[in-house]
Structures are given as C-alpha cells and as structure tokens.
Amino acid sequence: MQPVRQPAAIPREQGLVRPYKDLREWLSIVEEMGELKIIYGSDWNLEIAAITELVRMESKEKPEMLFDNIKGYPPGYRVLSGMVNTIRRLSLVANMPVEENVERFVRRWKDRLKELRPIAPRYVERGPILENVKAGAEIDLLKFPTPVWHERDGGRYIGTASVTITTDPSREWINLGTYRNVVHRRDLVGFYASPGKHGRLHREMFWREGKPCPVVVTFGQDPLLFHAASSFDVTTGASELDLAGAIKGEPIEVIRGEVTGLPIPAHAEIAIEGECFKDESVQEGPFGEFTGYYASGARPEPTIRVKRLYYRNEPIITGCPPARPPAESTFARSPLKSAGVWNTLEAAGLTGIRGVCMHPVGATYFFTVVSIRQAYAGHAKQAGMLAANVRGAGYMARFVIVVDEDINPFNLEDVLWALGTRCHPHRDIDIIGRTWSGPLDPMIPAGEPNLGSVAVIDATKPFEWKQDFPPAITFDESFMQETRKKWAKLLGL
C-alpha cells in the first residue's frame, strides 16, 4: 500500500466539491479536507468499535477512520467507519458545496430534491468489483475483517453500512435498502429486514410465488449509495439507483450479476449474489440497534445462500455501527429525511411550513418537529397528524411536535421552551394508536404485534387568541447584528 499522505487541509471557507467515482476517490477528497485518520494494528474484536465510539463521543472534529493491518488479517483488508458524521462530509455525499450548518443544509437539500430528475444506471462489462470473483468452495466471507460492533452482539455483522439490492418478480422495480447482515459461515449471511420495508416486501412477493428471492448485497461502496439505500424516501416502484444517478449528475455504473441478473455497482468494494429461501432461517442476534438498545433479542431470521463473491484488491468494509443516539447513522439520516418529509408535507397540500427536523437525538424516527405559520384554526393539528403518518416519518414514530414559526425546529432548547409554555397537556396532546412500528422498537415486548403509538403535540400559541398571547422576550435583529459586529472580536464571536 502507498504510505499515508499528509496533505494540506482544504480551507473551510472555500466550500470545495469535486466529483468522485467511488469510495477510494471519496477517501482522497476527505483526506485533502484533513478529515481522515488511518489507524494501524487494531483488533476486529470490539477494539475497532471502541475507537469508533470514542471518536463519536469525544472528538470535536469527528474524522473518518480507515483501519488497516487489522489483527489476524493481511494488510490491505480494511474497515472504514465514521463515513458521514459531519455535515461537511454529508455535503459531499449530496454533491453540494460544503456546508457547515445543519439547518442551511436541510433547506438547500429540500430545494435540490424537488429539482432532481431520475437517471437510470448504466450497465457496463467491466469494473473494479470484478478484480476477484469467487464461486462454490472458493467463497469465503470469513476472509474479511468483519468487526464485532457491540459487546452483546451475537455475531460479526458485515452489513451495517451495506446496500441490499432486490427486485419484485416482474423485475421492473429495483430497490436499494440497508438491512443488517451477520456472517453465519463462509457462504451464508443473515438477511434481517423490518416489516414494511421494500426489501422485505420483495422477499415476500417471491415467497408467495414459491420462489427464492434473488439478492445482491454490497459491503463497501460509494457513501452516496449507502445513504440512498438507508436515508432516502422514494415512492413504491421507484429506484434509489435512479435517484443516486440524479444526485451524481450521471448514471451509476453497474454490472449484471451472473446468478441473479441484478445490478451490482461496478465500483463497489465487496459484493455477494445469492438467494433467500422462505423456509431457511438461522438463529441470530442480539444486535445493538439505532435505537440505542439491543432491541429484538435473538431469534430465527432468513438467510442468503451466497452463490458469488466479488471483491476488489485491498477491499474496504464500510461500517456504520448503530449506537445510542446521536450516532453516525442517525446524524446523517436526520437532515436527509427532514428535507424529504418537508417536501412530502408540502406535496400533500400543507401550507405555511417553516421547517421540519427529525432529530438525531431521538434516533431520527422517534422525534419530529414541524414549524408552521398558523393560517387557520386546526392548522397545527393538521400538520401534526399528517407528519405522524407520512412514510418518511411514520415508521416507529413516537412524538410529533408542532411549533410556531418563531421557534427553530432544529434547536431543541427552542422546542422545549415552546413545549413548556405553549402546550396544555390536557388539551394539546393527541395519541394515535396502532401505528407502524417493528421489532427493533424497544417498547414492543417480544411476541407482541409490531404496533406502536404516536403522541401529536400542539406546542403552538392557541390560534383563537394568538394575537393576545404574551409577547416573547426578543431583541430587534438589526440591533443584534450591529452589536455583534461591534463587539464580536472582543467576545470571540
């Protein structure tokens, strides 16, 4: 391998972005930004996970970490974690100028989403993923340094920042999702997918026809594909591959799988092709999930029989281990989904929206805030009920809070102030029962139906007398700007 370069960091004020083809070009850009750490000699058994957790909890810069010379594995077999745990790196994924502020990112991403036009993938004959192709007895997923990510995990989960590619029996709908994959043996991996997720729906379609479900999974790829699979909300029948192409501004290059015929990203690091049979399950779990708990315990889950293994020379496993929020998985998902839900609410006809934030501290799904300018009686209730039920925000939803336009939904201090001063619990909280959830919800006991509940909280000034509501303590904004300009240097602002 080439020695680690020590490039000069890209100045933050330049906001530079340049196109990249694959994960390795992405890493070179992040390195130039001064946000990549390369770590040699760590142990796959919890040490990589512990380092990832220390950086997440204690580092101000939160660099991306590339682990090499991993204990028990040859040099060049690498693991990457912390891919997108800063808004700057998320800007690179979104192919937008580098941004420093989450709220500004959401507003720009919201507008960009509305302008995107799908670009279908391009099938090619060759690509780096074909550098090594294994079949039959040559397939060995144990050759990769898959970490143990949490102390109580029931196995080594190679699929945490992975992309699962499935289709429906008509072969007209290609879906990308991120579902957890544990390595059971050299040619068998788990395939857990929550109820209602598109990959699970595809699986069930094939099973109803008495057929195994064809599956492709990549375990290292362009971060854009990972976030297209895990954070973008596309309508049923649409493909995240097409949306990823739109974001790139060019088609995603794919090869056609030898076994399944499914598209495999040509520049992926590691990929498998296989089949998932209805009556083949293996005990797996527990696994530390994005909720911050070992939710769902251990139980039989479907598996993928691996028929082909593809990997690049010196392959990289991409890891995004779930952790107690806010973790990388929820940090990046929050702004991406916030913008998508905002657009969905407006498309449904809801007016007056000033902001939407699905908060990472609430594992994204559990805690959604909508800021609106009230135009009529019942407007706030309408906003809350709608936000609690749209697909992007409805899965495992727990609290939806509606606030006035003077409250910044991205600022939890603002939101809690509104909650404490503009909400009468006896009048302003509605509970919706039997809502969409899943076995990863820590509040659902084992064996119970996957049904949750949502509290819709109106934390707005009562519309009937909002003009008479006590005025909030504020300073004139222009006066504040003048004061900031005058005293900023002395105050270190």
Image (cartoon, rainbow, N blue to C red):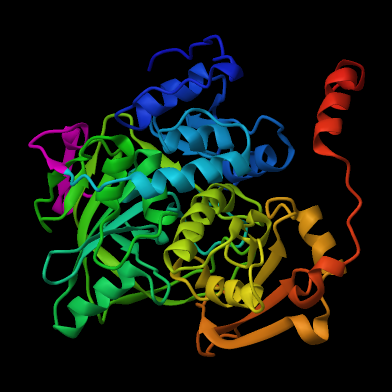
Is residue 215 shown left or right of residue 123?
right
x and y percent of residue 182 in the render? 41, 60
Left or right relative to 62: residue 276: left
User: Which residue shows up at 50% across the image and 48% down it?
Assistant: 320
Residue at 54 percent of width and 46 percent of height: 106
- Residue 144 visible in the current orientation: no
Q: Front-most of 465 and 281?
A: 465
Quadrant that contains the N terminus: top left
Q: Is residue 130 magenta?
A: yes
Which image quadrant is residue 359 in?
Answer: bottom right
Residue 27 in the image, given as x and y percentages of width and height: 43, 26
Figure quadrant of residue 36:
top right
Q: Nearer the viewer, residue 153 or 56?
A: 56
Residue situated in front as seen by the camera: 160 or 480? 480
Please count the marks in the image.
Answer: 0
Q: Quadrant of residue 88?
A: top right
Q: Which part of the image, by quadrant, shows the C terminus?
A: top right
Q: Is residue 466 magenta?
A: no
Residue 323 appears in view: yes
Residue 279 as seen in the image, left or right of residue 93: left
Q: Position of residue 437 (x, y in %)?
A: 51, 78
**Which residue is farthest front?**
467
Identify the residue at horizontal 34%, vertical 52% (top origin).
163
Relative to 435, 25 lies left or right: left
Report x, y in % for residue 38.
Answer: 53, 25
Q: Does residue 61 lie above or below 149 as drawn?
A: above
- Along the line of sight, the residue nearer the viewer: 310 or 478: 478
Residue visible at 47% across and 71% down in the picture: 390
Q: Is residue 57 above or below residue 372?
A: above
Q: Magenta part of the protein: which range?
A: 122-140
